[in-house]
Amino acid sequence: MELMGPIPTKSRLEAYAKVAKYGFLIFLMLIVVSPFILGIWTSFLPTADIAKGALFSSHMTFQNYVDAVTTTPILRYLFNSLVISTITMLAQLLFCSMAAYAFVFLRFKGRKVLFYVFLSTMMLPFEAQVIPNFTTVRQMGLLDHYAVMIVPFLTTAFGTFMLRQAFMQMPNELKEASDIEGLSHLQYYWHVALPYCRISLLTLAAYSFLGSWNQYLWPMLTTFSDKFRPVQDGLKQLQSQETFNNWGMIQASAAIVVIPTLIVLFIGQHYFKAGLNEGSVK
Amino acid sequence: MEQQSVPSKTGVVGAGHHSVSSRLSKAWVREHMAALLFLGPSLLVLGIFVFYPMLKTLYLSFFLTNDAGEGTVFIGLTNYISLLKNPSYIASLVATLTYVILVSAITVVLGLVLAVAANQHLKGIKIFRTLFSSTMGVSVSVAAIFWLFVFNPSVGILTQLSNALHLPVLNWMTDPKLAMAAIVITTVWMHLGFTFLILFGSLQQVPSSLYEAAEIAGTSKWYQVLHITVPMISPTLFFVMIVTLIDAFKSFGLIDLMTAGGPNNATNLLVYRIYQDAFLNGNYGQASTESIILTVIIAVMTLLQFKLLEKRVNY
């Protein structure tokens, strides 16, 4: 039949090619998003149906979400994470930008050496430092409190490095003009440098927020109560308590956790890309 | 005062020079005070939470330790030697290497496929680009829950598919090889969004004239990817590979959530082992030694990454 059909014209060939292209894209998309879809889909199924292995149910329900919110501390975990991540983010913006300012605009002895000292910390994995750090925070009396998840991360070499690149790209004329105006370092930092580099600051904000939000090992070692436990470790808590028998509610909790980060990501996507490029410009 | 003596060292201090040098030193003091103010907080934090623990860990790796995590008896390199002779540690090392190599190779190849596919002029392509990068927003515990459900032996989708197609049901979490495969798959999935975004960014910088020339020469799409795209973005490919390798070496959360190092220690990767030895077994000396070995591995990788960053900028 097909062989007898009309010889495909160029435009028809192009149409086939287009269908193939979309087909391939949809195939790839399904690979990437199917775990999401499956998870979120099952969060609407009654647990009894999930336990039977059914992927469809005659009564889709919000009950899992209601259960998660009313019978587990998931909202408290979310709130804890929000507090920890927001404070960590603000602190990193302040301290990283201050350090970066010093490296770019101040002339002091040992500047170069100190900069390499900062850079070298990027080679040292936090995972290899947890043993003494645990002793330190215990001696400071910070265990099982918000502070324990904030204080060790008040600054990062990565953030300093990134903002240093941004400050270095500021035009020299700005500094010269403000020197003539007699602006102090503090004034120039606050009124000129920070506003000028606000895109880089937003990028770092997104990074440090998500970085703090995704912490797992450190909070697991240092928080023991629902009052301060962040959401990543909270999810594990729910999972181990509900072992296997309440998949619907676990999936609903996961969905509650993932949706805010997806929103942050989609809004901040542009800044992420900008930051990735900036981080690589020397 | 020390500050005042510094500028005057440079020349003979005469009556005429004096006012200049004291003004210089005033500026010098002000500049250094500012430096202290701006850098002080960061130095303090890095000192307490990065440099001190690193040195302490190095120190502890040469000692026997007590329950409180204090060094008691200096034993030199004994911890290192006994670790490297310990078949279970070597097995961990091998498992970690297997894991990181599989993760970074598969992530980069899949990321490249996604990036090439997304780098077309088609209607609605932006939606695909956003969805391809979406796993960047997934944290470790959410990923673990999604995939534990996929791999679940009784209600998981893979089990159901096998049943429906009358294929043998695989025991993902109880077979050592399959458990490794499960954490590799989950890790790749988590890294895919980030890798895609970086590779896609660098694809867009490849001059389109190269493709147009290849088009005129009548080459296939596949040929163009292998002979134009890959060489042009190779610095970025190596860069994301190293970033993924470093991240994979530090994997902890997924292991804790999905396998707890099992079955039979098949997924007992380096960081999980440090955690077990230090916080479950109280063997701080050995855990410190493992931490130092991990640090050396990560440091070498990071130096490599810095070198590649320079290259990535130059081309």
Image (spheres, rainbow, N blue to C red):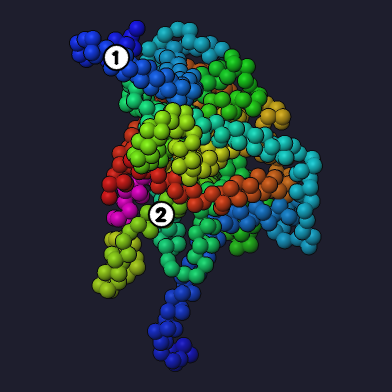
Task: Tell me if residue B77 comes above or below residue A53 in the rendering.
Answer: above
Which residue is depicted at the point 41% across and 33% down? A181
* Viewer-nearest residue: A78 or A252: A78
For the residues labelled 1 and 2, the Cα–Cα distance comes to: 56 Å
Which residue is depicted at the point 42% across and 62% down? B119
Which residue is depicted at the point 63% across and 62% down? B164
Question: What's the amino acid at mark 2?
Answer: Gly
Tell me the residue that label 2 is attached to.
B201
N-term-proximal mark, 1 vs 2: 1
Please give the range of residues in magenta: B230-241
SS of the residue under disc 1: helix
Could you tell me which chain the residue with mark 2 belongs to? Answer: B
Which residue is depicted at the point 63% across and 21% down? A143
Is residue A168 located in the magenta-colored stretch of the structure? no
* Viewer-nearest residue: A126 or B212: B212
Is residue B235 located in the magenta-colored stretch of the structure? yes
Left or right: B304, with A238 as reference point: left
Residue A111 drawn at (x, y percent): 34, 24
Q: Is residue A182 visible?
A: yes
Asked which quadrant contains residue B258, the reply is top right
* Viewer-nearest residue: A105 or B272: A105
Question: What's the amino acid at mark 1?
Answer: Ser
Tell me the residue that label 1 is attached to.
B19
SS of the residue under disc 2: helix
**Furthest residue toward left:** B12
Residue B83 drawn at (x, y percent): 42, 22
Q: Quick one: quadrant of the N terminus of chain B?
A: top left
Could you tell me which chain the residue with mark 1 belongs to? Answer: B
